[in-house]
Amino acid sequence: MTQPFRSFVIFAEMRTGSNLLEATLNGVKRVTCFGEAFNPYMMGWPDKDALKGITMAERDADPHRLLAAIFDKPNHLPGFRYFHDHDPRVFDAIMEDRACAKIILTRNPVDSYVSTALARATNQWKLNETETPIPAAARFDGAEFRQVVGEIEEFQLKVMHRLQVTGQAGFWLGYEDLRDAEVMTGLLHWLGRTDLKRVEPASDQVPQNPRELAEKVENFDEMAAELARLDPFMLRRIPNFEPRKGPAVPSFLGAEAGKGLIFMPIKGGPTGPVGGWLRRMGEVAGDFNQNSLRQWKRQHVGHRSFTVLRHPLLRAWAAFDSLLRGKNAELRQLMRQIHRVALPPDQELAGLDQGRKAELFAAFLDFLRRNLNGQTTLPAYPGWASQSEVLAGFARFGAPDMLLRESELPRDLSWLAASAGIRAPADFPDPDPFPAFLNEQELRGAAKKAYLRDYVAFGFGGQP
């Protein structure tokens, strides 16, 4: 049984109508919205020095004290407005509190941006029916707009993801809903106030700029051209259905040479040769956990961390070669039966000629494309997962200082060693040769389809 809400938060942004929504809620008995309680620049509302008896300094020292004070209101429904740039220290507590109702208020981002620009130009942030709007026109700044919209979109996706993983539901509102009595009544009923027959929207605020955008923006044509360059429907977005990867800290290697080197290997890459290069220069530690790695880093001031990218086609070949040579007989059987990679019986694998290997590798690349797009029952194993996703997993602990490329290691490792204070680094061996048939156009094209994210992100060409 779902527990009743004891509090609420309004996730909103500037000029989305949150003031009007707050006024509507505050017009209902036993419901109180305490403004932008965690805005770094004010205490709930402008020109307020304290909220619930807590000063700004006290709030900044311990924001959870104010959060507890706001929510400590028996037989009452308290809440506040929270924007993407408000104190992040209370976000987790809000999201984990299932008794705190989440209201998500949105508005067309262009309207919000222009409205914000006009409010800043006129310093007129609210308007009632007795006041006269100050005439003004805003100038659209494309770079600023992209940055603002990107930050807000990232925050909204974060809120949505947290709601999903915690099994909660939010109440989504658009700017146009705020003057709809039926929607406001539905909101209060959802909050648990089913005793209310009808909730009228607040009437003490009126729209400030009910003009066409062409009248409100000085450089309207420039704005239209800039917006046309954007991709609001993400038509050019590369789909990503790979599950998130962890930081894989136990696989990291810490070399004592010089000021210290941390190698963050991407499975399926040249881990063996790079590890051997490190060991030829001295002691190497491994089997870290996150705590022991932090301690190692503290003890090695000036250390450098790095990883090595492998061309996606060669990475796919390494995964396929491991499939053929490894002890994973069950995985090979799955490939035959389910995943349309017609491997011969295990006893015949060693005798495959180059032509047959090329055919089977083409089928394996098609499997990789489907696997990385979430179209198979098998997980995206680390040995063939996209390097973009592996790096994103590293970043959940700490991103590497440098991304080196396998094809340039003899040159780049010398520079890396010098940056870590290693005066005479070991030589790096020449790489083992790969089959010549990997340069066939069909295989190069299939690899790009499977690893499009990596080709785009890291600028890989067709030739390995």
Image: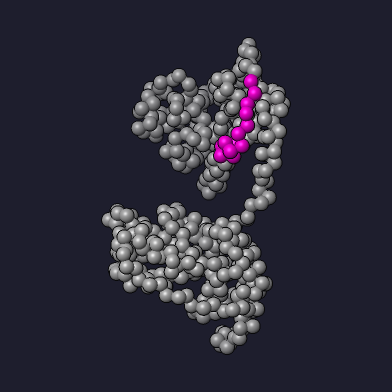
Give how far across and how far down residue 168 sits, in percent.
55, 43
Give how far across and how far down residue 261 sits, in percent.
35, 61
The quadrant of the rendering that contains the N terminus is: top right
Residue 256 falls in which quadrant of the image?
bottom left
Residue 426 as seen in the image, left or right of residue 173: left
Q: Nearer the viewer, residue 220 or 102?
A: 220
Q: Residue at x 45, y 75 (%)?
A: 430
Give how far across and how far down residue 82 sits, in percent.
51, 33
Residue 148 falls in which quadrant of the image?
top right
Colour pattern: one colour
Q: Residue at x 49, y 60 (%)?
A: 390
Q: What is the tally of numbered marks visible in this picture?
A: 0
Whether residue 71 appears in this view of the structure is no
Q: Nearer the viewer, residue 164 or 450?
A: 450
On screen, residue 401 above or below 176: below
Give how far across and how far down residue 441 sits, in percent.
66, 72
- 140 drawn magenta: yes
Magenta region: 136-148
Q: Residue at x 59, y 58 (%)?
A: 456
- 247 drawn magenta: no
Residue 128 falls in which quadrant of the image?
top right
On screen, residue 141 above or below 294: above
Q: Nearer the viewer, residue 461 or 98?
A: 461
The quadrant of the rendering that contains the C terminus is: bottom right
Name, please, the residue furthest toward the top. 130
Q: Nearer the viewer, residue 172 or 46?
A: 46
Q: Residue at x 40, y 30 (%)?
A: 66
Whether residue 302 appears in this view of the structure is yes
